[in-house]
Image: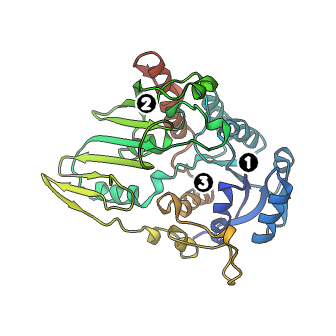
């Protein structure tokens, strides 16, 4: 492996703090700087992880010539602006989902990457989860046979979350179910048709003008005989948290568990069996392999509960870091790159537009291909 080191700055230290210990231990990363508006929180995190470079002002951080790449973990409304600022300041970008909240913002990010030659990666967790990697391995070995159909769902009750979530159109945060159904066949969405169903509380509708409790979208895959379906809900729908995908093949099919912590099912022909999904830490450098299941901010038994890192999102966090860092070291595109991220994100944005127009077919924009 190359000895090259990438100087990383993490922006936003809520969810973002989960990634600090992974970058600290990755052999090709230097966890160089952190940024948080709340100075007390900034210093708490900086002291705990031993990070000297600290910024409360994002614009000031971008002036630092030593930073190679930023990893953005801020509220979704800030993603596009902060990604564009970083690219224009000469920094590579990793950004938590979604890429943006409008088609035009997605276009601007794609164009900024083309103009600067810099790298953008949307940090979509599901396409690096152990479940996805398990199905991907089966598919690449030919065990599924021909892909026939894909389905994703992401259902979550967002009551009590920060105010900007209230009444958010379900499909505006759809990347966790769109990502895997496009990634497995290495496809892009060509057009979408989506229906809204049900109605959320009247006080929730006001903010975004979106009345639907559930939105369900069909996706036609470009240059393929495949289509996919994704379902999303955020409010007023009884369902345990579910972030899932199903894959139907000619030889075998994979169906996500209905209840969390149960085992998924593989159908071979008409014969079903429950299977235990293995971990995929063996795909990672030894230094960060433990983060698929556990990990704390240091290894000196100086543990503080507020810094214990979980195995969230199917063990995907170290895989995301590894993909981003190695892509930069090797000078290649990560998955998903800017165009792929835009295609995934625009599916959700345009799906909601379709739902508001009674299921109208809407094509994905050319810049996403």
Q: Position of residue 221 (x, y in %)?
A: 36, 33
Q: Residues within 10 Å of mark 3 (few under 14, many from 20)?
A: few
First along the sequence among labels 2 and 1:
1
- The secondary element bearing badge 3 is classed as loop
Quadrant in the rendering for residue 163? top right
Q: Position of residue 319 (x, y in %)?
A: 52, 61
- The secondary element bearing badge 2 is classed as strand
Residue 4 visible somewhere in the drawing: no
Which residue bears the numbered disc 3? 331
Seen as rendered, the residue at the extreme left is 270
Q: Position of residue 48 (x, y in %)?
A: 77, 71
Front-most of residues 233 and 323: 233
Q: Is residue 63 above or below residue 271?
A: above
Which residue bears the numbered disc 2? 215
**How far apart in space, not on screen, are marks 2 and 3 (Cα)?**
39 Å
Q: Residue at x 83, y 63 (%)?
A: 43
Which residue bears the numbered disc 1? 91
Q: Residue at x 77, y 63 (%)?
A: 32
> Quadrant of the image for the N terminus?
bottom right
Front-most of residues 64 and 42: 42
Quadrant in the rendering for residue 14? bottom right
Front disc: 2 or 3: 2
Seen as rendered, the residue at the extreme bottom is 300
Q: Position of residue 132 (x, y in %)?
A: 39, 55
Tell whether 172 sits left or right of 65: left
Quadrant in the rendering for residue 206? top right
């Amino acid at each position: 492996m190359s000895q090259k080191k990438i100087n990383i700055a993490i922006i936003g230290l809520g969810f973002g703090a989960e990634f600090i210990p992974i970058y600290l231990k990755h052999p090709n990363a230097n966890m160089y700087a952190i940024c948080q508006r709340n100075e007390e929180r900034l210093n708490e995190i900086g002291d705990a992880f031993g990070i000297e470079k600290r910024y409360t002002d994002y614009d000031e951080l971008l002036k630092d010539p030593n930073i190679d790449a930023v990893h953005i973990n801020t509220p979704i409304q800030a993603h596009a602006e902060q990604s564009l600022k970083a690219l224009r300041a000469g920094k590579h970008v990793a950004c938590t989902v979604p890429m943006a909240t409008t088609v035009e913002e997605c276009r601007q990010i794609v164009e900024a990457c083309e103009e600067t030659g810099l790298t953008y990666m949307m940090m979509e967790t599901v396409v690096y989860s152990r479940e996805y990697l398990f199905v991907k391995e089966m598919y690449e070995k030919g065990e599924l046979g021909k892909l026939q159909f894909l389905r994703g769902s992401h259902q979550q009750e967002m009551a009590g979350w920060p105010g900007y979530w209230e009444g958010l159109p379900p499909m505006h945060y759809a990347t966790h179910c769109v990502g895997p159904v496009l990634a497995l066949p290495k496809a892009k969405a060509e057009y979408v048709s989506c229906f809204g169903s049900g109605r959320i509380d009247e006080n929730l509708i006001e903010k975004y003008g979106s009345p639907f409790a559930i939105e369900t979208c069909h996706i036609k895959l470009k240059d393929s005989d495949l289509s996919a379906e994704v379902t999303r809900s955020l409010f007023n729908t009884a369902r345990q948290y579910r972030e899932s995908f199903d894959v139907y093949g000619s030889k075998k099919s994979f169906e996500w568990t209905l209840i969390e912590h149960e085992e998924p099912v593989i159908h071979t022909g008409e014969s079903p069996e429950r299977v235990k999904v293995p971990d995929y830490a063996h795909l990672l450098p030894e230094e960060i392999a433990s983060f698929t299941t556990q990990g704390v901010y240091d290894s000196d038994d100086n543990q503080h509960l507020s810094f214990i890192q979980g195995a969230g999102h199917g063990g995907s966090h170290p895989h995301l870091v590894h993909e981003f860092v190695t892509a930069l070291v090797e000078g290649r595109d990560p998955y998903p790159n800017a165009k792929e991220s835009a295609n995934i994100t625009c599916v959700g944005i345009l799906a909601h537009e379709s739902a508001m127009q009674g299921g109208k077919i809407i094509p994905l924009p050319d810049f996403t291909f």
